[in-house]
Image (cartoon, rainbow, N blue to C red):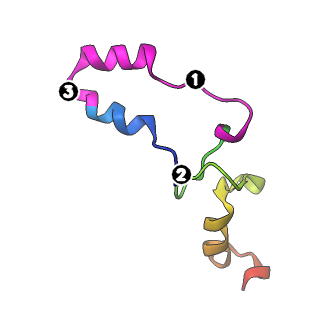
Amino acid sequence: MTASDWRKLLKQLEKKPAIKARFLKFCKPKERKFGVAAYKCVRCGRLGGHIKKYGLHLCRQCFREIAEQLGFKKYM
């Protein structure tokens, strides 16, 4: 199960500027520089098993699914 993205909730608050401002002040998570939650899979949003080598930014499961399309010969 992936973590819910706070940007989805922010999109719902577009019509209510006062509540949106309060949400951004108190509920927005801080940007992580280190640790598990620092990087997310760009395809599915999963936090664990992250491959950032070569700028892929995919989890290992998504990488296995599209490795052939990316040109990795080991998975052909």
Q: Which sits earlier in the primary sequence, circle 3 or circle 2? A: 3
**Residue 4, x across and y down, in percent:** 46, 43
Q: Which sits earlier in the primary sequence, circle 3 or circle 1? A: 3
Q: In the figure, 2 relative to 65: above or below?
A: above
Tell me the mark number nearer the camera, choosing from 3 and 1: 1
Query: According to the image, label 3 marks what residue?
Result: 15
The residue drawn where x is 78% and y is 54% is: 53
Query: According to the image, label 2 marks what residue?
Result: 45
Q: In the figure, 39 relative to 9: above or below?
A: below
Q: Please state, as top left, top right, bottom left or bottom right, where the C terminus lies in the image.
A: bottom right
Instruction: Identify the secondary structure beneath mark 1.
Output: loop
- Residue type, label 1: Lys
- Residue type, label 3: Lys
- Residue range of the region highlighted in magenta in the rendering: 13-37
The residue drawn where x is 35% and y is 34% is: 9
Q: Mark number for residue 30? A: 1
Q: Is residue 13 left or right of residue 47?
A: left
In the rendered structure, does residue 24 fall within the stretch colored magenta?
A: yes
Q: In the figure, 4 relative to 74: above or below?
A: above
Mark 1 neighbour class, 10 Å CA radius: few under 14, some 14 to 19, many 20 or more:
few
Prevailing secondary structure class for the magenta stretch in the rendered image: helix
Q: CA distance from mark 3 to mark 2?
A: 26 Å
